[in-house]
Structures are given as structure tokens and as C-alpha cells.
């Protein structure tokens, strides 16, 4: 079951916002989504911990027969992707591929700014890794990147309090802190898969000339191009349009919360092997 699917991994629910765009652009493939809800959030964990958790989940998806895994999580992409690509795949899984969300987003960021002043909002892990700063500066040295971590946003969203009045204080706090860094910021990248759910509140706070950049469609487009350019991977994939959902946490809770992110009903199964790992 699930053989030759595209694996989509996130620390929990947030990756479902990216998965939504992927299945909209590439509906023909089979997919397995895995959320590590038992150990989420990853945002405040150390490099070592995020690497270890991410690798375990990637290997689990490989064991389910996924030749290609997308890390639909900024924190995992920032803290684990490079090591997995450089050290694990060549030795242990030379025929498997793992892709992240940071590089594809950095590649297109210039399209969203006129002033070359870009704001980045993310978890502490993503921001402190400086991954966006480095990737964007490698590709576009003329762009100045201003970063702000938003540690309270994921808990608000995970508890479904993000659109309540009580969320306003923390939304404003981090948006104001970012905008105070430069009056010329005209593009804000939502560099966390949860943050698209806060768009109504963020939009109400920022001047109308500021572009809010959401990653889902960007990542899906980049995956489309990747599959066109890599027939050796694409030809392995099943085209049955199947979607399986797994969580390391409680399936009932996952199904309830997941529909907020995926905007359609989800019936998840328990990630069986995880019980041994926790
Ligand atoms: N999915 C994570 C990200 O995109 C946010 C949630 C977490 O901290 O685990 O950064």
C-alpha cells in the first residue's frame, strides 16, 4: 500500500497547506502525507533533535515505498535537509530523493519585491538557522533580508485560536517588530507552513503595497518542474490519484484539526513504527 507514492512530511498539520497546493497542481500522483504530531512543534527543538526526528520520518516514508519525499516544513528544511541530502542519501539511499521548501521559495522571491527589502517570518528554528538569509543572498545579493521569529503563532494556530480576538496581540507584536526594521519592506515571506491561516489578520495590519508570499503554490510549481526534469524519479511514481494520511499522534485529533489546514475531510492512520521510536 502506498508504493511509489510521493511522500510529504511535516512536523504536524502545517504541511497540509503545502500538500493542498501540490495535489491541486499534480492530482494524478499517489501521495502519503505524514505528520509527526506526537513530537510537534519542531520550531524550538535543537538542530540535532529536528535532524533525528526528520530523518526517522523520511526513512519511514521510504519504507512505505516513497522514492521521493518533500519536507513540507520550513523548520525541518532548515535544520535537517542538507545533512540528509549530503550524508544519508548517497550512502544509504542513492536512488531516493528528498526536497525542501526553502530553495524553491528563495528562487522566486525577487518576483515579489520592487525595493529589494524582504521580510521573513518563521519559527525560531527557521529564523535562527539563517537559511533564508543565506539562500536568498546567494541567489540575489542585492536583496536585503529582515527576519523575525514568531514563536507564539504556531501554538495559537494549533489550538484553533488564530482568528480569535485574543490572537491580535501576538500577530501585531511580530508584524510590527518586522516592519520596524525597515520602512522599505514591500514583501513579507510567510516562511512557516502554518502562517497562511493568519493571512486575514496579517493583511489587516500591513500597508496595502506589501506582498504576502505564501509557499504552497511556489513549492508545487517547483515540484512540477523537478518531475519534468527528472524522468528517472518521475517514471517510478504511481499515477492513481490516491492520498493516504498518517500521523504519529492521535488520529481523531489529527482528523479534526487537519481539515482546518487541508480544507477537506481527512481520515488518517496511525504511523505504526513510531510507537517504538518514542
Ligand atoms: N511546520 C513548521 C514550519 O513550517 C511549523 C511547526 C513547527 O514548529 O513544528 O516551520
Image (tube, rainbow, N blue to C red):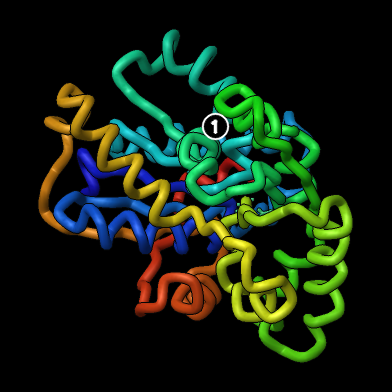
For residue 110, side relative to residue 178 (left or right): left
Give residue 202's quadrant in the image.
Answer: bottom right
Residue 138, given in percent of the width and then of the height, sits at: 61, 22
Residue at figure coordinates x 67%, y 37% from the top left: 50
Would residue 2 be visible to someone looking at this image? yes
Would residue 125 be visible to someone looking at this image? no
The vertical placement of 115 against 55, above or below, is below
Residue 117, given in percent of the width and then of the height, sits at: 70, 45
Pick the front one: 227 or 237? 227
Q: Helix, strand or loop at disc 1?
A: helix
Q: Residues within 10 Å of mark 1 (few under 14, many from 20)?
A: some
Label 1 CB sits under 8 Å from any ligand 1 atom: no
The vertical placement of 207 against 123, above or below, is below
Residue at figure coordinates x 54%, y 32% from the top left: 55
Q: Residue furthest top?
A: 91
Pick the front one: 255 or 263? 263
Would you name the residue on which mark 1 appears? 55
Pick the front one: 15 or 226? 226
* Count of picture labels: 1
Residue at figure coordinates x 51%, y 33% from the top left: 103
Q: Residue furthest bottom?
A: 165
Residue 94, given in percent of the width and then of the height, sits at: 35, 13
The vertical placement of 152 against 248, above or below, is below
Pick the front one: 196 or 272? 196
Give residue 157's quadrant in the image.
Answer: bottom right
For residue 226, side relative to residue 174 (left or right): left
For residue 154, side relative to residue 4 (left or right): right
Residue 255, given in percent of the width and then of the height, sits at: 46, 75
Amino acid at each position: 500500500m502506498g508504493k511509489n507514492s510521493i511522500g510529504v512530511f511535516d512536523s504536524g498539520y502545517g504541511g497540509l497547506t503545502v500538500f493542498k497546493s501540490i495535489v491541486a497542481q499534480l492530482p494524478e500522483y499517489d501521495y502519503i502525507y505524514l505528520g509527526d504530531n506526537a513530537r510537534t512543534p519542531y520550531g524550538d527543538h535543537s538542530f540535532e533533535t529536528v535532524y533525528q526526528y526528520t530523518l526517522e520520518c523520511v526513512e519511514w516514508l521510504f519504507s512505505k515505498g516513497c522514492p521521493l519525499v518533500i519536507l513540507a516544513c520550513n523548520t525541518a528544511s532548515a535544520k535537517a535537509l542538507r545533512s540528509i541530502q549530503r550524508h544519508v542519501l548517497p550512502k544509504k539511499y542513492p536512488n531516493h530523493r528528498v526536497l525542501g521548501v526553502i530553495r524553491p521559495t528563495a528562487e522566486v522571491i525577487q518576483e515579489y519585491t520592487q525595493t529589494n527589502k524582504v521580510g521573513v517570518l518563521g519559527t525560531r528554528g527557521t529564523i535562527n538557522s539563517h537559511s533564508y538569509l543565506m539562500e536568498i543572498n546567494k541567489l540575489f545579493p542585492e536583496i536585503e533580508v529582515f527576519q523575525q521569529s514568531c514563536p507564539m503563532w504556531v501554538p495559537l494556530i494549533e489550538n484553533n485560536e488564530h482568528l480569535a480576538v485574543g490572537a491580535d496581540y501576538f500577530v501585531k507584536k511580530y508584524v510590527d517588530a518586522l516592519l520596524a526594521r525597515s520602512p522599505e519592506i514591500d514583501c513579507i515571506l510567510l516562511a512557516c507552513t502554518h502562517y497562511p491561516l493568519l493571512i486575514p489578520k496579517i493583511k489587516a495590519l500591513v500597508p496595502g503595497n506589501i506582498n504576502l508570499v505564501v509557499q504552497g503554490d511556489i513549492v508545487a510549481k517547483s515540484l512540477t518542474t523537478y518531475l519534468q526534469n527528472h524522468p528517472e524519479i518521475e517514471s517510478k511514481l504511481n499515477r492513481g490519484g490516491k492520498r493516504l494520511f498518517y500521523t504519529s499522534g492521535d488520529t481523531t485529533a489529527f482528523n479534526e484539526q487537519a481539515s482546518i489546514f487541508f480544507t477537506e475531510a481527512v481520515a488518517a492512520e496511525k504511523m505504526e513504527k513510531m510507537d517504538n521510536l518514542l
